[in-house]
Amino acid sequence: MIDCREAVGRMWVYLSQGLEAHDVEELEDHLGACQRCCGELEFSRELRERVSQAGAAQVPPTVRDRINELLAHDGQPGESA
């Protein structure tokens, strides 16, 4: 089974339906056993939806930069670039 770091790292691609079937299966197996990562997935879904509704042009550059920073660190708070 994959660990939390790997699961979080796959979530955005998963939400875009870009993972291979084997990777989807591994992620879904992990989500079935990990409540924390289920929360991360729901947060990611909500964030994608809100950004999509607002349109990328309306998202301030500082917010885009912060999102990119978080994604670069697999969404782990407390890590800096």
Image (cartoon, rainbow, N blue to C red):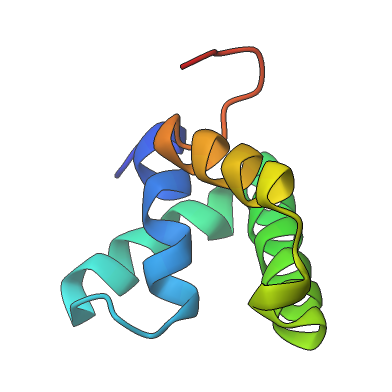
Quarter of the image for residue 26 reads: bottom left
| Nearer to the camera, 58 or 42 | 58
Residue 32 on image: x %, y %? 56, 59
Q: Is residue 74 left or right of residue 44?
A: left
Q: Is residue 28 visible?
A: no
Question: How many marks do you count on the picture?
Answer: 0
Q: Is residue 15 left or right of residue 24?
A: right
Image position of 75 with respect to 14: above or below: above
Residue 66 on image: x %, y %? 64, 38
Quarter of the image for residue 49 reads: bottom right
| Nearer to the camera, 63 or 20 | 63
Image position of 35 with respect to 44: above or below: above
| Nearer to the camera, 60 or 52 | 60
Residue 43 on image: x %, y %? 75, 57
Q: Is residue 46 left or right of residue 11?
A: right
Give the residue drawn at x 37%, y 69%: 13
| Nearer to the camera, 73 or 4 | 73
Q: Is residue 68 visible?
A: yes
Image position of 73 with respect to 27: above or below: above
Residue 76 on image: x %, y %? 57, 27
Where, quadrant-wise, is the N terminus in this rendering? Answer: top left
